Image (cartoon, rainbow, N blue to C red):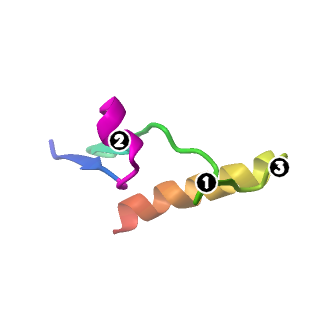
Amino acid sequence: MDRKRVFTGSPWEPIVGYCRAVRVGNRIEVAGTTAMKDGEVIGEGNPYEQTRFILQTIEKLFLN
């Protein structure tokens, strides 16, 4: 089964030793994805907007 590891270039990935996501077959495991962009919180106080931003971020990882 193919295994794809996804890195985003975050400075934390090499420091703490993780990758953003791993895809094995039709399963995707995601770690460390938050509603932050350029050091700013997206949708502060709005869980819907934060979730939307996070899911869009994950989607972009696997469309590239």
Q: x%, y% of residue 13?
A: 35, 41
Query: Magenta segment: does it hold 17?
Result: yes
Q: Of the residues under marks 1 and 3, which one precedes in the sequence?
A: 1
Q: x%, y% of residue 64?
A: 34, 69
Q: Give yes or no for contact between labels 1 and 3 (Cβ–Cβ under 8 Å).
A: no
| Secondary structure state at the residue bearing disc 3 | loop
> In the displayed image of the protein, which residue is found farthest to the left?
1
Residue at the spot of label 2: 13
Instruction: Give the alpha-carbon distance from disc 1 to disc 2, as whole Å.
Output: 16 Å
Q: Foreground: 44 or 52?
A: 44
Q: Residues within 10 Å of mark 3 (few under 14, many from 20)?
A: few
Residue at the spot of label 1: 39
Residue at the spot of label 3: 46
**Magenta segment:** 8-19
User: Image check: 22 left or right of 41?
Assistant: left
* Viewer-side label of 2, 3: 2
